[in-house]
């Protein structure tokens, strides 16, 4: 039997295997500024709890974090309001598209989970906490800077503007939530904060590093800083597993077997509890809105490394 590959070998093998798939999927074009991204990009970065790293391809090229930001906003919202957050947002998979509005009416303005757009708009409102968007946006950005150790992480103003100009569906969701009394701040403030957090530019390398605390129950294993309580970290992983890929969350759990969160920029952050954090980026999306090649790369990497929570 062949020996199990080292991390470096597995990452290099996956990178080579993905060459045949480059460009697959469709780049998100409903946000005009995202439509211009080169579909042939592919980056992969792994960082282990011992600080070992392995990278492939465009691991150092910044991309739009989009919905992966929802993981970090949820962490901040839980720290700010604690368990009370769960009266405003649920934790069940939605079985619908990420920007769906139908469930919200039937379920009285309480979104199914914090990773669909409606739910993230509520967690963003919780972080905003009646402050100004500038303060909340800086808090979210600084959280990512602190976690990644990279002071230059910032918001892509063009992407934020592009989404603000075309984000009628998110505006509908926010107005709907407000009508149900589930937003405290003005709709315009919540949307400005939401669009800005989605427009953060980050590389695979920085994203994997930023997510590493989730592999160690809320403790940053490389600098010993307590980022989040173990309870909250465990819950974020649970919701990543059950809701992180929208209507394909079951498929991701089946194929990859790890908590993960995707974004329409083509990135995916995946947590290997007690071992590592992995970030992958390939802009082409499948029909559900998750990175097509990124998902395949994670499937292959998890299989080669024997990683699974099951
Ligand atoms: N900013 C995007 C939106 O609100 C995020 C969606 C996503 O990444 N799935 O539509």
Image: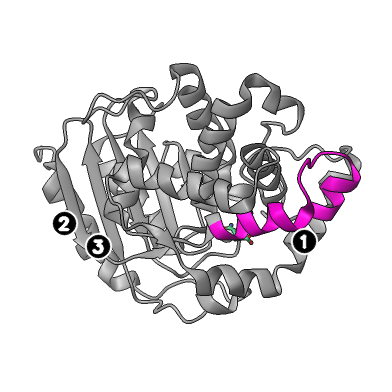
Determine whether, in the image, residue 110 is placed left or right of residue 142.
Answer: right
Q: Quadrant of residue 303?
A: top left
Badge 2: residue crowd in 10 Å (few <14, some 14–19, many ≥20): some
Q: Which residues are magenta?
A: 174-196
Precedes in sequence: disc 1 or disc 3: 3
Instruction: Tell me if residue 19 comes above or below residue 247 in the rendering.
Output: below
> SS of the residue at dot 2?
helix
Q: Position of residue 261 (x, y in %)?
A: 49, 46
What residue is disc 1 on? 171
Q: Position of residue 66 (x, y in %)?
A: 52, 58
Q: Residue at x 46, y 70 (%)?
A: 284
Instruction: Tell me if residue 172 comes above or below residue 81 in the rendering.
Output: below
Q: Per the image, is 181 magenta?
A: yes
What residue is disc 3 on? 60
Q: Which mark is residue 23?
A: none
Q: CA distance from mark 3 to mark 2?
A: 15 Å
Q: Position of residue 191 (x, y in %)?
A: 69, 57
């Amino acid at each position: 039997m062949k020996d199990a590959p080292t991390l470096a070998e597995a990452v290099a093998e996956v990178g080579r295997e993905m060459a045949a798939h480059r460009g697959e999927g469709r780049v998100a074009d409903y946000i005009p500024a995202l439509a211009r991204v080169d579909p042939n990009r592919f980056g992969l970065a792994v960082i282990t709890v011992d600080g070992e790293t392995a990278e492939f391809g465009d691991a150092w090229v910044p991309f739009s974090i989009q919905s992966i930001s929802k993981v970090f906003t949820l962490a901040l919202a839980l720290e700010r309001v604690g368990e009370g957050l769960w009266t405003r947002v649920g934790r069940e998979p939605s079985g619908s598209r990420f920007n769906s509005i139908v469930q919200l009416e039937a379920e009285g303005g309480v979104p199914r989970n914090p990773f669909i757009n409606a739910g993230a708009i509520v967690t963003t409102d919780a972080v905003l906490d009646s402050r100004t968007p500038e303060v909340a946006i800086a808090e979210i950005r600084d959280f990512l800077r602190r976690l990644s150790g990279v002071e230059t992480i910032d918001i892509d103003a063009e992407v934020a503007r592009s989404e603000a100009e075309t984000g009628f569906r998110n505006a509908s969701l926010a107005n709907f939530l407000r009508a149900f009394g589930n937003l405290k701040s003005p709709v315009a403030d919540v949307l400005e904060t939401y669009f800005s957090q989605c427009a953060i530019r980050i590389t695979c390398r920085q994203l994997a590093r930023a997510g590493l605390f989730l592999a160690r129950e809320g403790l940053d294993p490389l600098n010993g800083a307590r980022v989040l309580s173990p309870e909250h970290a465990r819950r974020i992983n649970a919701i990543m597993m059950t809701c992180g890929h929208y209507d394909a969350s079951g498929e991701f759990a089946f194929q990859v077997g790890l908590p993960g969160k995707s974004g329409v920029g083509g990135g995916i952050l995946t947590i290997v509890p007690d071992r590592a954090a992995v970030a992958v980026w390939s802009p082409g999306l499948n029909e559900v809105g998750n990175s097509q090649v990124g998902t395949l790369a994670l499937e292959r990497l998890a299989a080669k490394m024997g990683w699974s929570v099951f």
